């Protein structure tokens, strides 16, 4: 795991929030590619597939999310699977699955980050890239996992 602490915002710094959002979107794109093409972590982290310039802060945060998510993908997928009702894991769109995966990684491992912020960010990103109803599905899964994590403390 990288030795970078991404849990200290230093207040409501808008630049910090922009880097975080951009990092999450890059992580979503990388995890989408991972699920679709099965590229290795090393290939994904080269970011040669990015079309736009991004800040180093955004890329560092994206690397943190991508690496952590892929290294914990079995745990993350089992948490998604355990929350599904009348739905098969393989039927989840790659977009929704990718956003769920890095968000669940954050819910579990970014202890000092507000769980509500993590969920809200996931909802905003899935509204941009998912279907009209994706945000309801993503919100339901993430909220159930958040509650489960809170109860297990």
Image (spheres, grey):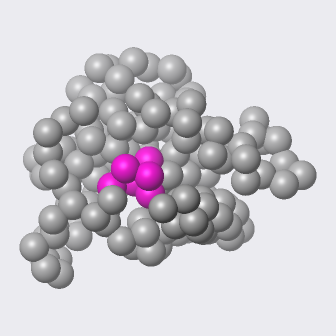
Q: For this view, does 93 lie left or right of residue 115?
A: right
Q: Residue at x 55, y 59 (%)?
A: 152
Give residue 27's position: percent from left, percent from top: 37, 45
Task: Examine the residues drawn in magenta and state their main secondary structure.
Answer: helix
52 or 103: nearer the viewer: 103
Tag count: 0
Pick the quarter of the image with the N terminus: top left
Q: Residue at x 15, y 65 (%)?
A: 8
Q: In the rendered view, would you say 33 is above or below 5?
A: above
**Residue span colored magenta:** 105-110
> In which image quadrant can residue 146 be found?
bottom right
**Residue 136 magenta-drawn?**
no
Q: In the rendered view, would you say 113 is above or below 4?
A: below
Give residue 92's position: percent from left, percent from top: 72, 45
124 or 51: nearer the viewer: 124
Q: For this view, does 113 lie left or right of residue 5?
A: right
Q: For this view, does 92 lie left or right of residue 6?
A: right
Q: Residue furthest right?
A: 86
Q: Is residue 95 visible?
A: no
Q: Residue at x 65, y 47 (%)?
A: 80
Q: For this view, does 52 lie left or right of residue 104?
A: left
Q: In the rendered view, would you say 7 is above or below 35?
A: below
Q: Is residue 105 visible?
A: yes
Q: Residue furthest bottom?
A: 12
Q: Residue furthest front?
A: 153
89 or 46: nearer the viewer: 89
Give residue 33's position: percent from left, percent from top: 47, 32
Q: Residue at x 39, y 18 (%)?
A: 40
Q: In the rendered view, would you say 24 is above or below 46?
A: below
> In which image quadrant can residue 117 be found?
bottom left
Give residue 49's position: percent from left, percent from top: 32, 32
């Amino acid at each position: 795991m990288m030795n970078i602490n991404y849990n200290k915002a230093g207040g409501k710094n808008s630049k910090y929030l922009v880097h975080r959002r951009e990092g999450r979107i890059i992580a979503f794109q990388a995890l989408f590619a991972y699920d679709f093409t099965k590229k290795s972590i090393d290939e994904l982290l080269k970011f040669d597939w990015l079309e736009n310039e991004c800040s180093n802060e955004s890329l560092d945060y994206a690397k943190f999310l991508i690496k952590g998510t892929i290294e914990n993908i079995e745990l993350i997928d089992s948490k998604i699977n355990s929350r599904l009702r009348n739905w098969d894991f393989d039927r989840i769109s790659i977009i929704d699955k990718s956003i769920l995966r890095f968000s669940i990684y954050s819910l579990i491992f970014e202890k000092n980050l507000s769980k509500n912020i993590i969920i809200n960010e996931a909802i905003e990103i899935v509204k941009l890239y998912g279907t009209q109803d994706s945000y309801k599905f993503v919100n339901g899964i993430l909220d159930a996992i958040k509650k489960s994590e809170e109860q297990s403390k």
